[in-house]
Amino acid sequence: MELTLHQITGHQPGPHLLITGGVHGDEFEPMAAIRQLIGLIRAELLCGRVTLVPVVNEPAFRLGRRTAEDGLDLARTCPGRPDGSVTERIAHALSSLIRSADYYIDLHTGGTRLRVLPLVGYMLHPDAALLNVQRQMAHAFGLPIIWGTDPNLNGRSLSVARDANVPAIYAEYHGGGGCDQLGVEAYVRGCIQVMAHLAMITAPDPHSTSRPAAAPIVIEDGRPESGHMQINHPAPCEGFFEPAVTLGQFAEKGQVLGSVSDLLGAKRVPIQAAHAGIVLVLHTFARVDDGASVAVILETSGQESGLARSPAILDS
């Protein structure tokens, strides 16, 4: 299987950067941002090569949902198989592209069911030099939260990059089923800033950005399963989910994050915060499946006051 992509080869030598969106078919801001990058990046001003894939998971996009018809999550299926199901074949093609790159950026959102505070993340790679490159890329991207997590998670695009020793970051920005222009702009700006950091293009004028830069909140958490959002605060049953918190607010341990009820609203099951922290991810789609994550709480070690000062957080 071949992915639909666009390559721009610069007039000067340099590294190969891969930028992907649409690993999940219902995450639209990355797709729009990469389409814009195709028109913005000029070969005569570029050192190296950029491979741009706006929609990795085309079958899922055509269905308007997170996964393709086989129901497999592409972000849990890498490195895939060349002779497998449609998602396994896409995972194999994506993994081959990742291995060919010198650097990798994977853009995401919360899709149609979740909203996520703007963040950029990476795996806590065991190679100190490579980890430092990822940290630098994350800072260059310019989102208000930087999150380094468990290096041992598998099945992901970033786990393929980890195994191939390709410095890689991912980003999240809101979600909800639309295409937030603020998210698109943040992603275009972030990718350009990483390219400038990698000396692939001339650094953009810092005064040309629409908002002042704020010092990011940096959280590195190497505990097992950190960064695995889908296992956090699972719904106890299928039903109607009503959140009791808002994205970005501070929640205390034991605070009710929301409740799941039956169709008549008579039987209501509360879901409590397992620990204190910032509401990083919130399920915003009213219907929830049994076991689906309804919230992710980011333990901030007292840095939550910095989040409140961040302009991008205020937009959430």
Image: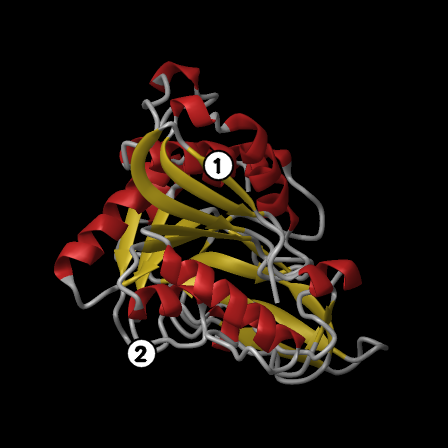
Task: Using the rendered view, name the quadrant where residue 266 is placed.
Answer: bottom right
Which residue occupies 39% across, 45% down?
17
For the residue labelled by badge 1, is the local secondary structure a helix, a strand or a loop? strand
Identify whether 136 is placed above or below 267: above
Q: Earlier in the sequence, mark 1 or mark 2?
A: 1
As drawn, which residue projects farthest toward the left? 128
Task: Using the rendered view, name the quadrant where residue 285 is placed.
Answer: bottom right
Q: Which of 112 and 198 is in front in this view?
A: 198
Q: Nearer the viewer, residue 27 or 147?
A: 27
Q: Looking at the picture, how far across and down is residue 102, in whole percent? A: 31, 51
| Tag 2: amino acid | Pro
Q: In this view, does 261 lie to the left or right of 27?
A: right
Q: Which of 175 and 157 is in front in this view?
A: 157
For the residue labelled by badge 2, is the local secondary structure a helix, a strand or a loop? loop
Which residue occupies 32% across, 46% down?
138
Residue 8: mark in rendering: 1
Q: Is residue 46 left or right of residue 3?
A: left
Q: Looking at the picture, how far across and down is residue 166, in whole percent? A: 30, 58
Is any atom of residue 77 visible in this view? yes
Q: What is the CA distance from the residue labelled 1 to the residue labelled 2?
A: 38 Å
Quadrant, the N terminus = bottom right
| Tag 1: amino acid | Ile
Q: Name the residue under label 2.
A: 224
Mark 1 vs 2: CB contact within 8 A:
no
